[in-house]
Image: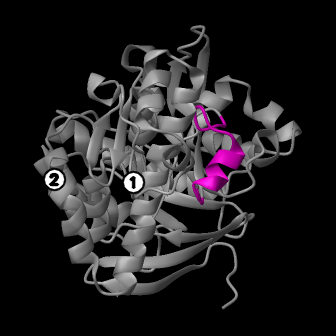
């Protein structure tokens, strides 16, 4: 079946869990999909070839960071982020909103947008919904995200309700700045509403009434308990349009991802696997491994005997431990290759299980090893 850019096709469902295909300007993405985070135009420690070897389908770029360095206009002069970085697969660019709002004392919110000071040099900048679209058009990412306000955990009901109204108005302005049919880039809206289920419903009604190419759940994994995160995630996922891709932003552990898939979510990103790799925590079919531990000093076995990644097929636990303890740069590359391979295989196998009507048994198998990560 021929697919045009922006088409989303559901291939199979297993209760709410689903597998499908999303067509972008740089290729078709099979869902559910995990998206490695490439903040400044690269996934830390990896080359584009490494990403292809672990079968990454799509990576993320960060609008805030790329705007500050090297600058979106410089990237545009080099043909966009794909040409600049050497990654020819799909790219999703976030709006930079989360980074801006995390600055707290360095930013000021208004109806027009958000004024902030760079964490690099203190210089003053302003992001409006339209400006954020302009930056992402310069990046030429395949999927752009609207500017939204990420409400901090603990915000009261009054602030949260006021904020979701602002997010909805910014979403409408973003769509007006890049109307449907303007180009080959897709534009996703973001549902907020904090930790109040009825406000999540209100935000979804407002944002999902707009003609976006997909919809995201924002504002989770910001300090709340795991049970609360799961409650709000499941509630919000049920509100999103069935025929559009659904994206859970910035979450999480292997079980978080499987819980999201179970709720009907298609797309995931998180810094956890790559950040933990650089800290020596590795995900395996037998559970998490802290490669720093002395017990691996003379362990000649592979990190994970069930893994086919470059690190597991070529090197021993003893060597991986040695590299990490010696602070050799190769440790960060090999560890990141392995962790991303694990996450990407997790979503690939989840898709296969959904197609076979066996998602619950697959989730239970992973849960037997990783259920403690819910705590």
Quadrant where the image shows the N terminus:
bottom right
Answer with left or right where residue 225 lies relative to residue 85.
left
Q: Are marks 1 and 2 in contact (CB under 8 Å)?
A: no
In terms of image quadrants, where is residue 233? bottom left
The residue positioned farthest toward the bottom in the image shown: 1
What secondary structure do most residues of the magenta stretch adopt?
loop
**Of labels 1 and 2, the one closer to you:** 1
Magenta extent: 41-57
How many residues crowd around disc 2 within 10 Å: few (fewer than 14), some, or many (20 or more)? some
- Residue 353 position, x and y percent, is 35, 78
N-terminal-most mark, 1 or 2:
1
Image label count? 2
Determine the residue positioned at 48% across, 47% down: 312
Q: Which mark is residue 305?
A: 1
From the image, tell me which residue sits under label 2. 371
- Residue 200 position, x and y percent, is 24, 57
The residue positioned farthest toward the top in the image shown: 121
- Residue 177 position, x and y percent, is 65, 53
Determine the residue positioned at 58% across, 56% down: 56
**Element under label 1?**
loop
- Residue 328 position, x and y percent, is 55, 19
Quadrant where the image shows the C terminus:
top left
């Amino acid at each position: 079946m021929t697919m045009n850019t922006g088409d989303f096709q559901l291939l199979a469902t297993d209760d709410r869990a689903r597998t499908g295909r999303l067509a972008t300007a740089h290729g078709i993405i099979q869902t559910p999909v995990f998206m490695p985070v490439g903040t400044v135009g690269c996934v830390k420690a990896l080359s584009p070839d490494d990403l292809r070897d672990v079968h990454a389908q799509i990576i993320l770029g960060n609008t805030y960071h790329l705007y500050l360095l090297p600058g979106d206009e410089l990237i545009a002069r080099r043909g966009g982020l794909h040409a600049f970085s050497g990654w020819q697969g799909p790219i999703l660019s976030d709006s930079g909103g989360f980074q801006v709002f995390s600055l707290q004392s360095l930013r000021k919110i208004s109806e027009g947008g958000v004024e902030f000071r760079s964490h690099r040099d203190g210089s003053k900048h302003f992001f409006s919904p339209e400006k954020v679209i302009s930056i992402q058009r310069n990046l030429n990412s395949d999927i752009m995200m609207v500017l939204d306000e990420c409400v901090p955990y603990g915000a009261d009901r009054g602030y949260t309700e006021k904020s979701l109204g602002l997010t909805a108005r910014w979403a409408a302005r973003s769509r007006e700045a890049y109307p449907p049919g303007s180009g080959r880039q897709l534009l996703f809206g973001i549902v907020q509403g904090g930790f109040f289920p009825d406000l999540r419903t209100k935000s979804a009604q407002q944002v999902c009434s707009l003609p976006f190419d997909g919809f995201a759940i924002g504002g989770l994994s910001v300090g709340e308990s795991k049970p609360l995160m799961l409650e709000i995630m499941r509630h919000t996922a049920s509100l999103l349009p069935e025929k559009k891709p659904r994206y859970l932003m910035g979450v999480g552990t292997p079980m978080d991802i499987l819980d999201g898939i179970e709720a009907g979510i298609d797309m995931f990103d998180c810094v956890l696997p790559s950040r933990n790799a650089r800290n020596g925590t590795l995900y395996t079919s037998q559970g998490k491994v802290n490669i720093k531990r002395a017990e691996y000093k003379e362990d000649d076995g592979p990190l994970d005997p069930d893994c086919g990644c470059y690190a597991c097929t070529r090197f021993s636990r003893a060597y991986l431990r040695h590299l990490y303890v010696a602070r050799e740069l190769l440790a960060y590359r090999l560890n990141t290759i392995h962790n991303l391979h694990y996450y990407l295989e997790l979503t690939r196998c989840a898709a296969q299980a959904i197609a076979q009507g066996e998602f619950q048994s697959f989730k239970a198998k992973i849960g037997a090893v990783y259920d403690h990560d819910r705590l």
